[in-house]
Amino acid sequence: METKLEEMSSFFNNRVDGYEQHMRSNVAGSDKYYVETAKLIPKTEGLNLLDLGCGTGLELDEIFKVNPSVKVTGVDMAEDMMKKIKEKHPNKLNQINLIVDNYFNYDLGEGVFDAALSVQTLHHFTHEEKIKLYKKIFKSLKDDGFYIETDYMAPDQEFEDYHFNENKRIRSELGITNGFYHYDTPCTVENQTEMLYKSGFKSVQKVWQHESTVILMAKK
């Protein structure tokens, strides 16, 4: 059987029609973690929220129920997926700013957002890539801002090491030296926490877990 990796934006754009059903049916806890993530969003009028890897906006569906006035900047490489957000929320178009870009490259600004979040998107990247991004998130937040990460996390270091090594092996076999390709490399909660502290956050707390999905809250 031939091993292959699919470029990240193509992977998600090609699966846009079945993505939401897949997440609800095949990802453990998906009936819970979008709701639990939304519960952490304050009901402040006009809250300025950054959503990294927003996809079709499954978390935003729940967040709009909690805070209908929230202003969202969503960054994602998969343009076809983000179109679904506008289709689902035609009455929120003046509150939604969608950016088609790689969030590692996009300028998030400084002191702009009250809160930032990512849901099931960062388990594809290295520690170094994540720390670089977390520093950008930290900088983009207001002084009392916070970051929520809801993601697939590794149960132990052995599991994490195995998948990072497999990713390297497959990339080497295919001659891939850079770029973003779809392969799951989840990190342990301990490593995630350490990365967030290294990036400047003053407190990091695990606030929820269901099987392999964990919600972390990092405060500036």
Image (spheres, grey):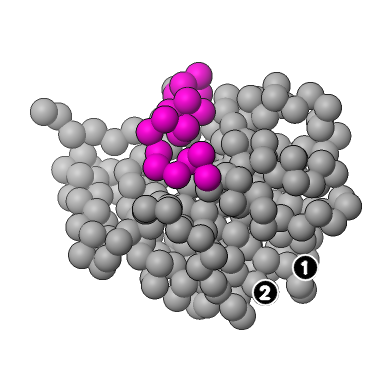
Name the residue tied to disc 2.
Answer: 220
Q: Quadrant of the N terminus?
A: top left
Where residue 96 appears, as percent x and y from the top left, is 77, 38
Q: Residues within 10 Å of mark 1 (few under 14, many from 20)?
A: some
Q: Residue furthest left?
A: 1
Q: Residue furthest right?
A: 45
Could one spot residue 152 in this view of the protein?
Answer: yes
Name the residue tied to disc 1.
Answer: 142
Magenta region? 15-32
Magenta stretch contains residue 30: yes
Residue 133 versus residue 95: which sits nearer the camera? 95
Where residue 162 appears, as percent x and y from the top left, is 20, 57
Q: With 215 as the anchor, is 172 left or right in this view?
A: left
Quick check: marks 2 and 1 in contact, CB under 8 Å?
Answer: yes
User: In the picture shown, does residue 122 fall above or below 157?
Assistant: above
**What's under tag 2, amino acid-wise?**
Lys
User: In the picture shown, does residue 159 fall above or below 54?
Assistant: below
Residue at 86 percent across and 34 percent down: it is 94
**What's under tag 1, amino acid-wise?**
Lys
Magenta stretch contains residue 11: no
Could you tell which of marks 2 and 1 lies nearer the N-terminus?
Answer: 1
Q: Residues within 10 Å of mark 2 (few under 14, many from 20)?
A: some
Q: Residue furthest top?
A: 17
Rounded to the nearest angstrom, the CA distance separating label 2 from label 1 is: 8 Å
Q: Quadrant of the C terminus?
A: bottom right
Where residue 128 appears, as percent x and y from the top left, is 42, 65
